[in-house]
Amino acid sequence: METNRKLTGKIVVRPGVSNDLDACGSIFYEAFSSVNEQHNFPSEVPSPEDGKHLLEALFASGVHFLVAEMDGRVVGSNFIDERSQIAGVGPISVSPDVQSRGMGRVLMQAAIDRPRDHRLEGIRLMQASFNTRSLSLYAKLGFVVREPVAVMAGLPTTHRAVAGCTVRLAETADLLSANALCRKVYGSDRSLDLQAAIERGDGLMVEREGRLTGYASGFGYLSHAVGESTLDIEALLCAAERVDGTGIVIPTRNGELFRWCLENEMRVVIPYTSMTMGSYAPPQGAYIPSIMF
């Protein structure tokens, strides 16, 4: 929970620009390293350069970038993905020297207000389960706990075709069917995210009996996957060649998928909690969320 020590000075939250990425990357590194170390978890941002690289990837993909200044000094940032009717928030980071004084609330409120202004249906985020301060803050702001998830490192040791499943590279012609599947499983499509993955050559499709039953936009913090069944997700994971970032976000209430990942030598690194505001329906199928949603 945030303390009663108030922020002083002139506070401004504004759209971020490319020149902010160096400062925000360093703050991202310092903030995550500090809180994770306090709770004996590995840092998800190994260096300031890694922090800048992840923020650059978000910025380049068109995710809205918010920067907080205090008396003209950059002290934090937040991101909000508005590329579908459901918005995803994060990562949020605040300079350690101004933490626990309300800056996190300021940045989160600014992110929440944007979807409301744009009349989006809902907002989702992933919250590090060990961080009781952020859990309390997000709940106070109106977010509801939905799902336990775990960041899992590594790739499955089973690099083989899954019986009955055919995995191939995604093509632009797949978008219509893939978006319909995502709406069926997840409640909304993520068309722009998938289209960008296809253009990068990262998108994968899985078919059973000649019918599209799942896809992945890649594997890692900024990627997602959906499938009609756990089998589809397993087939996609078996075809993965790399993981971008700390790991892959696995919903642990899907006991079949979670056990399969553990049996194939993927390991739990950090527990997270999925939280939502606004429109929400439980997924109808199997899925892997990004670190935003």
Image (tube, rainbow, N blue to C red):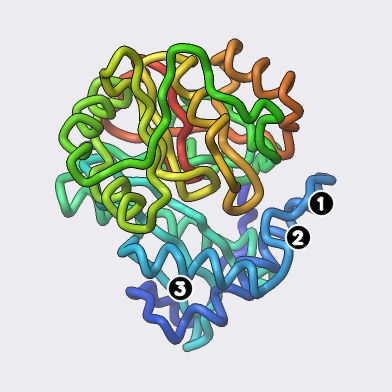
Q: Position of residue 54 (x, y in %)?
A: 53, 64
Secondary structure beneath label 2: helix
Q: What's the residue at 54%, 74% (across, down)? A: 24
Q: Residue at x 41, y 37 (%)?
A: 216
How crowded pointer 3 is (Cα within 10 Å; few <14, some 14-19, many 20+) is rated as many
In this rendering, the label closer to the viewer, 2 or 3: 2
Indicate left or right for 284 with 252 as reference. Answer: left
Residue 51 position within the rendered picture, expressed as x and y whole percent measured from the top left? 61, 67
Residue 283 figure quarter:
top left
Closer to the camera, 192 or 164?
A: 164
Q: Are marks 2 and 1 in contact (CB under 8 Å)?
A: yes
Residue extending farthest to the right is 40
Residue 248, compared with residue 44, is above or below; it is: above
Above or below — where is 130 with respect to 226? below
> Residue 57: horizontal and vertical position, in percent?
45, 65
- The answer to whether 151 appears left or right of 200 in the picture is right
Residue in view at x 38 percent, y 27 percent = 206
As drawn, 78 above or below 10: above
On screen, residue 211 above or below 78: above
Residue under pointer 1? 38
Residue 34, numbered label: 2
CA gap, disc 2 and disc 1: 6 Å
Q: Secondary structure at mark 3?
A: strand
Name the image quarter holding the C terminus: top left
